[in-house]
Image (cartoon, rainbow, N blue to C red):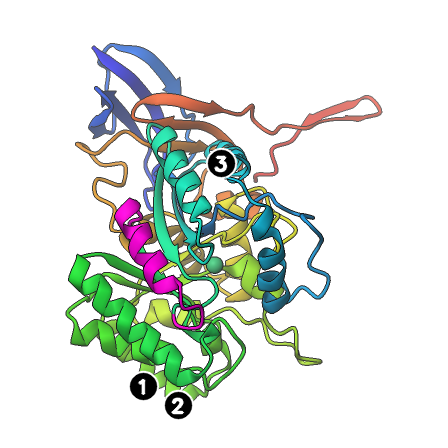
Amino acid sequence: MLDLLVKNARLPHCTQCCDIAIHDGHFSEIAPQIDALASRSIDAAGFLVSPPFVDSHFHMDSTLSYGQPRVNESGTLLEGIALWGELKPNLTVESIQERAETLCHWAIARGTLVIRSHVDISDDRLLAVQALLEVRRKYAAWLDLQLVAFPQDGYLRYANNRSNLARALAMGVDVIGGIPHFERTMAEGAASVKALCELAADHGLLVDMHCDESDDPWSRHIETLVFETRRLGLEGRVTGSHLTSMHSMDNYYVSKLLPLMREADIQVVANPLINITLQGRHDSYPKRRGMTRVKELLRSGINVSLGHDCVMDPWYSLGSHDMLEVAHMGLHVAQMTGTTEMAAMFDTITINGARTLGLKGYGVVAGNPADLVILQARTVQDALRLRAARLFVIRRGQVISQTDPVMPNLHLGVQEHSIDFML
Ligand code: FE2
């Protein structure tokens, strides 16, 4: 007998509905019709059934700290970094863990079951590393949390970060981070990229750097990251996060850069909510959007995924950890409103994210772990347009979150209408 049978499911990029059989925590069969007995059956009623959302870039140590000790009034990246510095002395393992666990609950309710979180290692006590390793362990049954050792105050700019990073890796952090545009000079930024990539090659680890997160059209750390990736044979294992300077770069230079990025199989993560908020703050009008060139990167065959980056922290006052909101903003900022472009944008929060993180067994495919989300939408376009309700979130064949359909009832005189906002 099956553990769970999902009937009438519409998978992304499929026009026909199918049934999904789940046994022993894994997808056992996906076919047009399955009539086997099951302990539990859910009728998806033609709604979209997606693999869980993947948040490719987040900061779980600072999340939900909004207002502590004050709010970022300028809205700039640099005031955010300064504000985080003011908060850090007052952090405890318990307070970080409590906020991170609340965020995990929000993410699960929104259908996100995979998060790559950067964790600041610039605090010599490594309290955030301790807290997030514990959260990773405690929530492993429900959510995959990948941790990046992130030297927020600079790998070379803050001298202790070399030893702090080594300690964080020894404690069990998965990925090597960096922030070359925050080092003291362009040369030191490039040196940090070289050193961190060599460390990753030595340890057999992935790399994910905050790279060129500025409006400076001359920031060239992505070029160095591409070069080091090729030199060290790290193709496919290195991520450039943000890359907002690419928005401002000269078009001719970008035409040379894109094929080099493709050649090195660089993974790109854009963070639309944060990029549109933090970048362009020094502009009057016209005001740059700041997000990297998502459309052109995808067209060049480069894997692009999206991150939420922040929820209610020193850099961003808003958010509820909703990856559909991220993709919704992303398609507006990138002007990816064509049908195939919107479908591609949905991929950036699902399969592309899985590729960035190097996940194995991701996707609604027979043999994979049975993780899925049933959305109150019939197409990916409607899922994005409505930021559709996540009716069921299923992990290893178990329902771990359930939401009632959004269905307002109108009372217009003698007329009664139930509406679902779909044609
Ligand atoms: Fe970030």
Is residue 305 something one can see in this rendering? yes
Residue for badge 1 = 256
| Helix, strand or loop for disc 3 | helix
Disc 3 beta carbon < 8 A from ligand 1? no
Quadrant placement of the C terminus: top right
Residue for badge 3 = 97
Q: Which amino acid does the dot numbered 3 rest on?
A: Gln
Residue for badge 2 = 252
Mark-to-mark CA distance, 2 and 3: 46 Å
Q: Nearer the viewer, residue 142 or 164?
A: 164
Q: Which amino acid does the dot numbered 2 rest on?
A: Tyr
Q: Is residue 57 left or right of residue 272?
A: left
Please report contact status of discs 1 and 2: CB closer than 8 Å, yes or no: yes
Q: Residues within 10 Å of mark 2 (few under 14, many from 20)?
A: few
Q: Nearer the viewer, residue 370 or 67?
A: 67
Q: Residue at x 51, y 34 (%)?
A: 94
Disc 1 beta carbon < 8 A from ligand 1? no
Q: x, y percentage for residue 6?
A: 33, 23
Disc 2 beta carbon < 8 A from ligand 1? no
Q: Residues within 10 Å of mark 1 (few under 14, many from 20)?
A: few
Q: Which amino acid does the dot numbered 1 rest on?
A: Lys
Query: Which mark is first along the chain, 3 or 2?
Result: 3
Stretch in magenta: 156-174
Q: Residues within 10 Å of mark 3 (few under 14, many from 20)?
A: many
Q: x, y percentage for residue 418?
A: 66, 26
Q: Residue at x 61, y 45 (%)?
A: 65
